[in-house]
Amino acid sequence: MDIAKIYVKGGNGGNGCISFRREKYVPKGGPDGGDGGNGGSVLLQATENLTTLIDQVYTQQYKATRGQHGKGKLMRGKNGEDRVIKVPVGTIVRDADTGELLADLTEPGMQLVVAKGGQGGKGNARFKSSTNRAPRVAEKGEPGQERWLNLELKLIADVGLVGYPNVGKSSLLARTSAAKPKIADYPFTTLSPNLGVVRLGYEKSFVLADIPGLIEGAHKGVGLGDDFLRHIERTKMLIHVIDTAAFEGRDPTEDYKKINEELLLYNPRLARLPQLIAPNKMDMPSAQANLPRLQEYFGKRKIYPISALTGEGVSSLMNAAFSLLQRINQKLRQEEESRPHKVEPKRYTGKPQFEIIPKDGKFIVKGEHVRRAALMTDMENPEALILLHRKLKNMGVINGLLKMGIKDGDTVQIDEIEFTFSTDGIQTGS
């Protein structure tokens, strides 16, 4: 599993403006305070350009920008900009506090709003009525949602390294990634698959698997070969590493043919996977001598001579692997888009809900709409308190509190805001 924990916060909404039109020869111009802009949201977006959560491991906090405050002359504040976090396809998103599964981003382009931006507050022009021609009240911007998230990604290798034992697969993995496989000059050094992240640049990475060396009869279980082959069944492409130096007296071209035979016998799909050919150990004179014969064998097919020890040619090989992987992903995406998708009907969610919990001598009211109304109220403005009382009454909160046995003078808490209850209105606030 590739795991990251991140903090996300939507931008706060901008405050509404209290303003009155003041122009020559217009002594009673009326309210003209504009609304605040909405805060930007934080979104996760699944992309095939990434196959790891390494960017989220190093950057843990993501915040969207806040909405601008409203201004006079009915000028609405500008909305904040959304913050889009790109993550690999297959990322599982959970709320870090509750453990709730929020989404499994299984398709390229899928988006999930993980921290919604706050709504902009209304300016005083919105509160003008036949009975209140000059309202001196405006809403505060709603705070943006904030939370910690756990991101999980089951690492499935994009690219598998195959070849005989001791051809240099582990050395290549160590050269190209931060993985630290065991490396020694004897066969079967690697007894279990190792995964490494190859990072070529920002949003350019893939997962590379060092599969333990295969031998003849691997498809029958010789040398634990059937266990090793199982690990590359879900890879999208292979890099076939060849011991061009032929230290142990084997023929490089025969090695190549025998490994492909084992792949075919185990699972024909593996033999059809795209392969890049990487003749290794080019730092050795014997490899230099064998390379022309290997090039003649492959003809016009491009091969990538490398030295995992010195790094020669490795960069070209990895860039070629990334380019090929992109083309494979594009083809898979086109195949997916051609399939019919089931459209889920929209569901009616019903009226806003709230919950009242008597605790420690207080009446705690919970509910998204109730919370929003309280947080967007200027608790030091008497007119705003009258407006909040009216909103709570329309939502049914006041009647709900009375049914719970609340009395005048009791304390009501909504989020972090507390005030004294009164059937006539909100008397105090903090």
Image: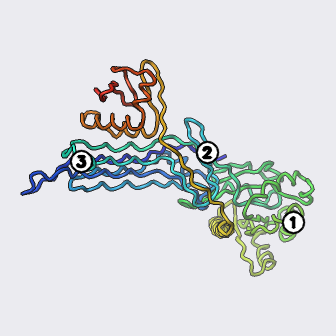
Asked whether residue 154 is in view, the answer is yes
Query: Image quadrant of residue 403?
Result: top left
Q: How is the image coloured?
A: rainbow
Q: Position of residue 12 (x, y in %)?
A: 37, 46
Q: Which dot marks residue 264?
A: 1
Classed neighbour count for the residue bearing mark 1: other residues with Cα under 10 Å, few (<14), some (14–19), many (≥20): some
Q: Which dot marks residue 3?
A: 2
Q: Residue at x 75, y 69 (%)?
A: 274
Q: Amino acid at mark 2?
A: Ile
Q: Is residue 94 left or right of residue 34?
A: right
Q: Residue at x 42, y 50 (%)?
A: 64
Look at mark 3 in the image and give the residue it sits on: 128
SS assignment at label 2: strand
The residue closer to the viewer here, 27 or 334, is 27
Q: Residue at x 33, y 24 (%)?
A: 420
Q: Amino acid at mark 1?
A: Leu
Q: How much space separates mark 1 and mark 2, taking CA atoms?
A: 35 Å
Q: Is residue 168 left or right of residue 113?
A: right
Classed neighbour count for the residue bearing mark 2: other residues with Cα under 10 Å, few (<14), some (14–19), many (≥20): some
